[in-house]
Amino acid sequence: MGSIFTAFLASSCCIGPLTFTLLGVGGIGFGASFEKYRPLLIVITTIQIGISYYLVNRPLDKICIDGKCDMDKAAKKRKINRIILGITGGVAVVFLFIPQILVLIA
């Protein structure tokens, strides 16, 4: 979730004015104030996504409780986490490339 938030902040220079324009509010340049922090926010987003991919794809530890080892639970959890991470990573990438996408559309 942190990577989506920082990716959103990194693209807020373009998303903010676009959102206000779509809502019919003009002349608000709030999002433009984040432009100077965009490179830092992109780096933070990339680091967070990288850490998340490492944590989701690291080797599974054998979970043994009372002599019963249940690898199926860990595998199911890993599958759900990979799906969530894929969606999160996709959303973050879209947010990061919003300025370039808007230039292509306009």
Image (cartoon, grey):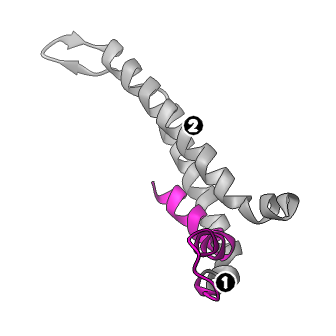
Q: Mark 2 and mark 1: span between their CA atoms? A: 29 Å
Most foreground residue, 22 or 35 = 22
Q: Is residue 90 visible?
A: yes
Query: Residue 57 vs residue 27: left or right?
Result: left
Other residues around mark 2 within 10 Å, as few (<14) / some (14–19) / many (≥20) = some
Q: Position of residue 64 (x, y in %)?
A: 23, 19
Q: Position of residue 14 (x, y in %)?
A: 69, 72
- Which residue is identified by label 2? 86
- Which label sits on residue 49? none
Q: Are marks 2 and 1 in contact (CB under 8 Å)?
A: no
Let me know if residue 19 is in the magenta part. Answer: yes
Which residue type carries mark 1?
Ala
Query: Residue 64 vs residue 42: left or right?
Result: left
- Which label sits on residue 32? 1
Position of the N terminus by quadrant? bottom left
Which residue type carries mark 2?
Gly
- Which secondary structure, mark 2? helix
- Which secondary structure, mark 1? helix
Magenta stretch mostly in which secondary structure? helix
Let me know if residue 26 is in the magenta part. Answer: yes
Q: Residue at x 53, y 45 (%)?
A: 88
